[in-house]
Image (spheres, rainbow, N blue to C red):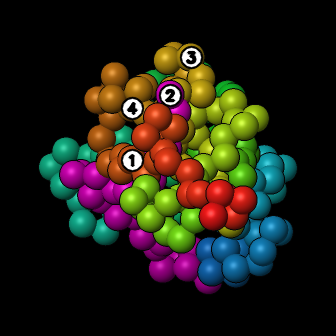
Amino acid sequence: MAKVYQLFSGEYVQHLAVAEESREFYTSQSRRRSNGIWDFGSGGSKKDCWQPISLYIREPLEEPADIYKFSSSVLILEQRARDALAPVIESCGEVYEQPVEGRKCYVLNVMRFCEEPVGKDDFPEDGLYYPLEGVDSSIVRRPGGRVIAVSGVTPPELDFKLLVEKHNLKGLWFREVWDSENYIPPPSQEDE
């Protein structure tokens, strides 16, 4: 049985912000579709052109997060998360060094895609269907860039959500948006 999860900032919500000295560069590089260093929606490699920017935690908590959801298409990992998720990272994309307040962190560039879900909205009761044929990674991008987690398509040791839970990594909340067992396809036009 396969399940699809949308990723949200979890109970340890700590939003990262671009420091003033990097804001102009970040803005110019995040808006250049398919070419910008900080445009991760395309899923292309950035290893030959990567340039980190200055990031800080906007409202720090006593206990730091392990994973930061910088945007719908960018996850930033503390060293602990990078180590725990290494098998998944190797199968789904690349990581680039990205310091956060002087600590060594990493941007995860997910380079595996799934097809666009079919339906009206991101809620299973609205009839969204995720075509997962050919998906062989537990973290993928939807067309347009949003990163989602998929359970049940890889062995457990390569399951992103299971590894986050096993290692008690903080910073993400998983909302189930689809499962293959309870999905009822809409009637085809031939049935009507």
Query: Which residues are drawn in magenta?
Result: 1-24
Q: Nearer the viewer, residue 8 or 58?
A: 8
Residue 1's disc number: 2
Q: Nearer the N terminus, badge 1 or badge 2? A: 2
Q: Nearer the N terminus, badge 2 or badge 3? A: 2
Q: Nearer the N terminus, badge 2 or badge 4? A: 2
Residue type indicated by callout 4: Val
At x 59% / y 57%, what residue is drawn?
187
- Is residue 22 rendered magenta in the image? yes
With respect to residue 56, does 154 lie above or below? above
- Mark toward the viewer: 1 or 4: 1
Q: Using the rendered image of the protein, determine whether residue 88 is visible from the camera's viewpoint.
A: no
| Residue wearing tag 3 | 155
Cα distance between the residues tagged 1 and 2: 13 Å
Q: Is residue 35 left or right of residue 171?
A: right
Residue 25's disc number: none
- Tell me, yes or no, whether the two marked residues, 2 and 4, touch with CB atoms within 8 Å: no
Cα distance between the residues tagged 4 and 3: 15 Å
Rendered location of residue 122, percent (x, y): 47, 63
Residue type indicated by callout 1: Glu
Cα distance between the residues tagged 2 and 3: 12 Å
How packed is label 4: few (under 14 Cα within 10 Å), some, or many (20 or more)?
A: some
Q: Nearer the viewer, residue 32 or 135?
A: 135
Residue type indicated by callout 3: Pro
Q: Nearer the N terminus, badge 4 or badge 3? A: 3
Residue type indicated by callout 2: Met
At x 72% / y 52%, what residue is drawn?
115
- Tell me, yes or no, whether the two marked residues, 2 and 3, touch with CB atoms within 8 Å: no
Q: Nearer the N terminus, badge 1 or badge 3? A: 3
| Residue wearing tag 4 | 164
At x 52% / y 33%, what residue is drawn?
2
Cα distance between the residues tagged 1 and 3: 19 Å
